[in-house]
Amino acid sequence: MKVKVFNYSLSVVDRLRFLYSCNQILCQAYLTDHSFVRKLEHMLYQYFSSEENSQICLPTVVNSATSALYIVFSTCFEIGDKVAVPNNTFIATYQSLVAAGLKPVVVDTHPSGVGISLDSLKKAHSLHRDLKGIVDVHIGGFISQEYDQLQRYCHTHRLFYVEDSAQAFGAKTEDGNYAGLLGDVGVHSFHLTKNLTSGEGGCILIGNQSHASLFESFRSRKSFGVGDQTTLYNTHSLNFKMPEFSAALGLVNLRNIHKRIKKRRLHSSRYHELLDKSKFEVYSDLSMKHQNSAYKCIVRAPQSIIRRLERSSDFTLTGYVYKNPLSQQPIVIKDHLEQKCFLSSSLYNSINFSQTHFCPPNYPEVLFTQVRYLAKIANSI
């Protein structure tokens, strides 16, 4: 039995909804950043709004999560500012910091591999007293394990707290707060493989209206003109607008978001039940304290077992989160040598995690028979 690394499908009804929306877009003639993007922003606002999050502003939808991060870093910091980032994250988090002219300070993660380690941040801050903020990352859809302590530390030391929630759409804390609304600003991804997809895309969440307006302006070069001269600009900006077709697909998938996340979580729980607990540790809500979005099913195992799984032609892996931390990326090492970034002296937790975990398929389209088949192969290793 061959199990795909990833699969995506729409029901016949949802395909018709999407095609109908595409026809509407063609009839309106505005193909980007128009009515469907506005509707997606309003639907996202309704999704995230609650009594706990009553101060959230209208989300700013853009063409990718990397763009969203770049907008945040460009508008919330000054060129040359130092910002802490966990060693275990996708390279785009780091690259968007550098692209915005900032200096990353790479710190270690919590022993679980999920989120910044408070102890590592404190040590880095003692060496870099001019640190201006942090980028905390909810890896695999699991809430950063020390987010509440990081919140307090950032508040005390006036550090700007950015959440990279690219993989955590739908994840919640124990008290019901969504990932992306725990810090000063949060970013989500709508990439193909994510819980909510628009093919490609992302959004920014914030409770500060002045920042929200700035994000919206930066996205499409609005309000940057000199006086009434709309073709003269007094600051740098780029084009990060989302196409209407992407927004239409995002709206179709948002209708089904709870069902898709539920399926991911169900598959992850099945791996938890089926995998041999003497060999494997499957991350769960109980072990990780919060309600995860199940973007990835994270399984810890000895390196020897993981190597054998990698060599198996029968076993399917959906990648890692991540196999190569920032400290092993050639571009990061080069930047460190040129003092464009700073690597903490101890990164043990993140490096150990990168070598001792794997992620079996848990996307909504995978079948229970396939999950059972993969668990059987893993147990036989």
Image (spheres, helix red, strand yellow):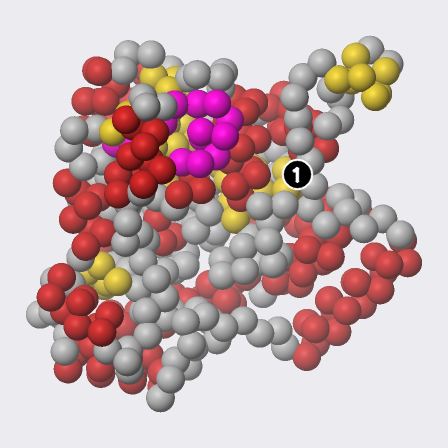
For the question of whether residue 59 can be seen, the reply is: yes
**The quarter of the displayed image where residue 240 is located:** top right
The stretch drawn in magenta includes residue 137:
no
User: Which residue corresponds to mark 1?
Assistant: 240
Do we see residue 105 in this rendering? no
Mark 1 crowd level (few <14, some 14–19, many ≥20, 10 Å Cα): many
Residue 73 pos. (x, y %): 50, 27
**Helix, strand or loop status at disc 1:** loop
Q: Position of residue 304 (x, y in %)?
A: 11, 66
Task: Give the farthest residue toward the left.
Answer: 278
The one nearer the camera, 377 or 195, is 377
Q: Quadrant of the N terminus?
A: bottom left
Q: Tell me which residue sits at (69%, 46%) in the image.
A: 242
From what the image shows, is residue 150 above or below residue 280? above
Q: Residue, x 56% and y 53% (percent of image)?
A: 190
- Give percent across and percent down for residue 364: 47, 71
Residue 85 found in image quarter: top left
Q: Quadrant of residue 82?
A: top left
Q: Residue at x 62, y 39 (%)?
A: 59
The residue at the far bottom in this view is 1
Residue found 37% across the figure and 70% down from its top:
361
Q: Left or right: 343 with respect to 276? A: right
Q: Quadrant of the C terminus?
A: bottom left
Residue extent of the magenta highlight: 94-107
Q: Position of residue 291 (x, y in %)?
A: 36, 53
Depth order, front residue of 376/205: 376
Q: Is residue 192 above or below residue 368?
A: above
Name the side, left or right, on which 192 lies relative to 137: right
Q: How many marks?
A: 1
Q: Amino acid at mark 1?
A: Phe
